Image (cartoon, rainbow, N blue to C red):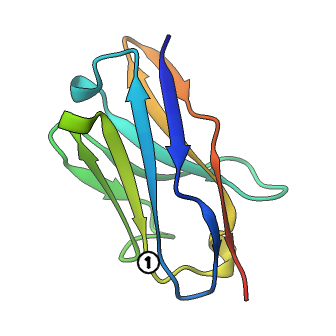
Amino acid sequence: QVQLVESGGGLVQPGGSLRLSCAASGFIFSISPMNWYRQGPGNQREWVAAITRDGSAVHADSVKGRFTISRDNAKNTVYLQMNSLKPEDTSVYYCNAHYNNDIYWGQGTQVTVSS
């Protein structure tokens, strides 16, 4: 019922940019805090950014100043603008929602930063 569908990943060169999208359905998106996480090869899943229902955002130190989380409640979509990408940003990026004390995950979208 609850669905989170990430898109926008791909292969990009170091220093490049991507914008990830997460389309949400099956719950009241407008009142749900949203997050982005990532998981690189051999690594545990790492929190990247969070945003409240009103658009207040916080970012992990590793991406601060380069990534920006945002949301459009009218479109039930959360975004992650990724600038100045580095090889170490290579990961599967996951959208995450907290709703009614449950946690939901998307399937992930692959971001590869390489020359």
Which residue carries the number 1 mark?
83
Decide if residue 55 is on the left or right side of residue 44: left
Image: 103 above or below 19: above
User: Horizontal and vertical percent for residue 13?
Assistant: 63, 85
Comparing 103 with 15, the one in front is 15
Q: Count every numbered label the image shows and give the total.
A: 1
Q: Residue furthest right?
A: 42
Quarter of the image where the C terminus is located: bottom right
Residue 64: x and y in percent read 39, 71
Q: Report whether 55 appears left or right of 100.
A: left
In this rendering, is residue 17 above or below 29? below
Q: Where on the picture, by quarter, is residue 107?
A: top right
Left or right: 114, with 77 as reference point: right
x 53%, y 43%: residue: 6
Tag 1: amino acid? Asn
The residue under the point 49% across, 31% down is 4
Residue at x-position 64% and y-position 65%: 10
Most foreground residue, 4 or 90: 4
Q: Percent from the top left, x then y, of residue 112?
A: 69, 69
Dot 1: what SS? loop
Disc 1 residue crowd, few under 14, some 14–19, many 20+, Cα 10 Å: some
Residue 62, placed above or below residue 87: above
At which x and y percent is residue 61?
Answer: 45, 68
Q: Residue at x 82, y 58 (%)?
A: 41
Residue located farthest toward the left when viewing the structure as drawn: 54
